[in-house]
Image (spheres, rainbow, N blue to C red):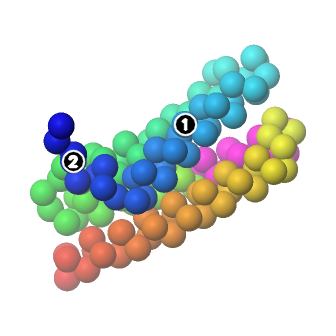
């Protein structure tokens, strides 16, 4: 089976695991959040790894960097949503801290990837 280049990226692997974690955690959210935070958080979490994958299929460094930028923005959107979820006590403090740490690692990696992609444009 062919392994695509995005599958080798640590940032993609971590973001994929984060998406799975978000899906599992949001199963415990109140039912009335099905079309609110649950849907939003799941879409954001999947968007991070999806944009990383899509960006690797682009030919220009500028396009690659743009998809990395979108992945970064999705991670920040997810951070906002976990903060709100914690405020509403849908997440325990431990779950909140754990996800926040994951997002911090992923955004740092995305920042480095973006910078390396942007240098190619110079």
| Residue 20 in view (yes/no) | yes
Which residue is tagged 1?
20
Provide residue 32's location: percent of width, then percent of height.
76, 18
- Residues at badges 2 and 1 in contact (C-beta under 8 Å)? no
Crowd around label 1: few <14 · some 14–19 · many ≥20 (10 Å): few
In the image, residue 65 lies at what x, y percent? 30, 63
Q: Position of residue 76 (x, y in %)?
A: 57, 55
Query: What segment carries the magenta color?
Result: 77-88
In the image, residue 106 above or below residue 38: below
Query: In the image, what residue occupies the spot 40% across and 59% down?
Result: 10
Q: Quick one: 94 or 72, which is closer to the camera?
A: 94
Q: Is residue 70 above or below residue 112?
A: above
Image check: 74 left or right of 89?
A: left
Instruction: State yes or no: residue 87 in magenta.
Output: yes
Give the overall secondary structure of the magenta segment. Answer: helix
Q: Which mark is residue 73?
A: none
92 relative position to 34: left or right: right
Task: Locate residue 98 relative to residue 115 in the image: left or right.
Answer: right
Say which residue label 2 marks: 4
Look at the numbered disc 1 and give the secondary structure of its residue.
helix
What is the residue that sits farthest to the front in this orientation? Answer: 1
Label 2 crowd bin: few (<14), some (14–19), many (20+), radius 10 Å:
few
Residue 106 in the image: state x and y as whole percent. Answer: 51, 60
Q: Farthest residue in the left direction?
A: 59
Which quarter shows the C terminus? Answer: bottom left
Residue drawn at the location 81% of the way across and 51% of the way down: 94
Which residue does the image show at 55% across and 46% down from the upper left? 18
In the figure, residue 11 lies in which quadrant? bottom left
């Amino acid at each position: 089976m062919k392994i695509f280049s995005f599958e080798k990226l640590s940032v993609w692997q971590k973001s994929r695991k984060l998406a799975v974690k978000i899906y599992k955690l949001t199963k415990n959210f109140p039912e009335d959040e099905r079309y609110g935070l649950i849907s939003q958080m799941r879409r954001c979490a999947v968007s991070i790894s999806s944009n990383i994958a899509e960006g690797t299929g682009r030919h220009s460094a500028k396009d690659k960097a743009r998809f990395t930028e979108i992945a970064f923005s999705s991670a920040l959107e997810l951070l906002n949503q976990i903060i709100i979820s914690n405020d509403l006590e849908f997440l325990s403090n431990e779950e909140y801290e754990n996800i926040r740490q994951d997002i911090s690692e992923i955004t740092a990696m995305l920042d480095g990837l973006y910078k390396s992609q942007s240098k190619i444009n110079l």
